[in-house]
Amino acid sequence: MTSPSDGGTGAPTDVGAGTPPAGRARLRRDASAPDLVAAARDGDPRAVARLISLVEDANPRLREVAAALAPHTGKATIIGLTGSPGVGKSTTTSALVSEYRRRDLRVGVLAVDPSSPFSGGALLGDRVRMQEHSSDPGVFIRSMASRGHLGGLSWATPQALRVLDGAGCDVVLIETVGVGQAEVEVASLADTTLVLLAPGMGDGIQAAKAGILEVADAFVVNKADRDGADQVVRDLKGMLGLGGRHSEAGAWRPPVVKTIAAKAQGLDEVVDAVDQHRAWMGERGELGRRRHARAAAEIEALALVTLRAEMKDPHSGTSLGALADEVVAGECDPYAAADRLVEELRAS
């Protein structure tokens, strides 16, 4: 189902969550944050879409929304999918949704697409592949524009993730933009990161160059019916034996799973690998550590946004503009200017 509030290419699009059950009261446009959260947890796709729109628009009601969501978060399994363009991320994501629904779990998907250079919205071609879930009330899929944010994610992804978690999703899949070697930011948001590769694309070489070995919690060699799939598997296993964090005593060793996502083959093994990794993290306290780091990074990012806004506010009392003039004139160096600005902020 396409969200009634977000439509058309170039705007965020929601798919899934079906039609709200008969008899449910229509959500008012001025609904309070607690009402929106309650409706979202009750499976209302309009409420989920509206909450994520508030996040993307940096709406002033975000503080109220975050407070209402907080008691309900921390329960979903967060899975990140990344990989080069053409490896089949969207097809794999759709197949994973089907596998989790077969296990009767509620699924949310954040699919981060490249931004249109004209509208700033998402280029939604890959979402067509997920239309098979459009009438499923247990699935919510949101396409988000990266809007130029580096790292393969939208700046709003952490807060949108919190919305889906708080809305009662058992599993949240984050599919990133396929944008190259260094774009592995998804690992900081996910409990488990799946790195997708495919034969015939030079992925074995790319893995060695990009440091993907340090990011992956599991490797998925998709399109395994093509020539060269077994070689990719051998290359990955060989690289895992060369060292790195996975070779430390007691460390998690990422499994390598072959799939044919277009034929829904091998996805049960992927889900089993995710479950095994989650169990391993639970035994060693790694899950708590990752979520602590994620929360700290989110708090830091929000604090920096507030500080930047305060520094640029002409009524805030800071002398950012005057300090910049002094640096340009050679009367002060940038480090000394930054120290003075920090002192002003502390005093305010």
Image (tube, helix red, strand yellow):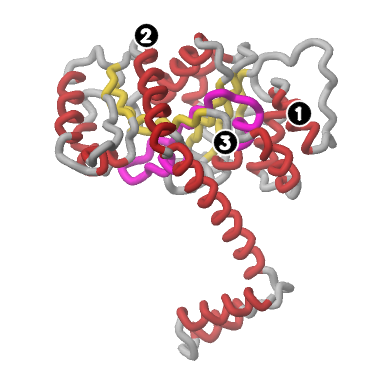
Secondary element at tag 3: helix
User: Which picture quadrant has residue 193?
Assistant: top left
How many angstroms separate mark 2 from mark 3 (CA)?
29 Å
Name the disc covering residue 263, or none: 2
Q: Which residues are magenta?
A: 162-189
Q: Residues within 10 Å of mark 3 (few under 14, many from 20)?
A: many
| Residue 117 seen in this snapshot | no
Q: Residues within 10 Å of mark 2 (few under 14, many from 20)?
A: few
Residue 30 rendering spot, x and y as whole percentages: 84, 36
Residue type pointed to by label 2: Lys
Seen from this angle, which residue lies furthest front?
283
Q: Which residue is mark 3?
A: 161
26 with respect to 296 (left or right): right
Position of residue 84 relative to residue 326, above or below, is above
Q: Which residue is mark 1?
A: 38
Position of residue 189 relative to residue 174, above or below, is below
Query: 242 or 176, which lies in front?
Result: 242
The label nearer to you, 2 versus 1, is: 1
Question: Residue placed at 60% from the left, 15% from the top?
Answer: 134
Question: Residue placed at 54% from the left, 47% from the top?
Answer: 295
183 with respect to 253 (left or right): right
How many angstroms separate mark 2 from mark 1 (CA)?
37 Å
